[in-house]
Amino acid sequence: MDCLIVIDFQERLARHIENIDEILKNSVKLVEAFKVFGIPILLTEQEKLGGTVEEIREVLEVEPIKKKSFSCLGSLDFYKEFKKINPKRVALIGIETHICVLQTAIDLIKEGCEVYVAIDCTGSRRSFDKEIAIMRMMQEGVKLSTAESLIYEIMRTAEFERFKEILNIVKG
């Protein structure tokens, strides 16, 4: 995995998302693991929705990239940072699944990226919207996963030099 994109986990929106506590718990684990792996992380904030929720802010020491477009790639500032990394395999998490996560995933595929979405790290206000977005992502060729599955896929072996550190994150 070459990059993790953390999409719009913002205070004003998060409180309306179904199952947000579990989504944030899984997302924090994934962010912490990506930090251990040394994989670049990009964070976005949709303008006018407030700051990033505390749970994510506490573990992610990167400046959020402000955007007005729903797809992250529709933001010139984001696109410039994305191209500096120039990833081929990208993992996505965030809210809302059926808007910003979906549109970003589709645009990343158009950019030639292999896209993974940790479904247990995404959410929508209504479960039906999330369900339809998941079906759409599958049709578009997105690889669906979970936080824990992605962590172990990146780690590949229990012989990973920081295995115990990752294990503590997963068990957290």
Image (cartoon, rainbow, N blue to C red):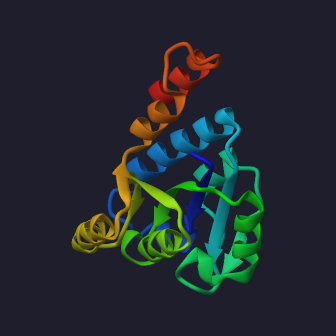
Q: Which residue lies furthest to the top in this view?
A: 159
* Residue 36, picture quadrant: top right
State whether residue 78 is above or below residue 39: below
Q: Where is residue 57 in the image (x, y as percent from the top left)?
A: 67, 54
The foreground one among 124 and 34 is 34
Q: Where is residue 19 in the image (x, y as percent from the top left)?
A: 34, 56
Which residue is pictured at 63% across the width and 64% down the height? Answer: 52
Which residue is pictured at 29% across the width and 65% down the height? Answer: 134
Q: Where is residue 74 in the image (x, y as percent from the top left)?
A: 61, 83
Which residue is pictured at 62% across the width and 49% down the height? Answer: 2
Quarter of the picture holding the N terminus: top right
Please give the count of numbered marks on the rendered protein: 0
Q: Where is residue 23 in the image (x, y as percent from the top left)?
A: 42, 52
State whether residue 26 is above or below residue 20: above
The foreground one among 38 and 127 is 38
Which residue is pictured at 38% across the width and 45% down the height? Answer: 146
The foreground one among 51 and 98 is 98
State whether residue 48 is above or below residue 21: below
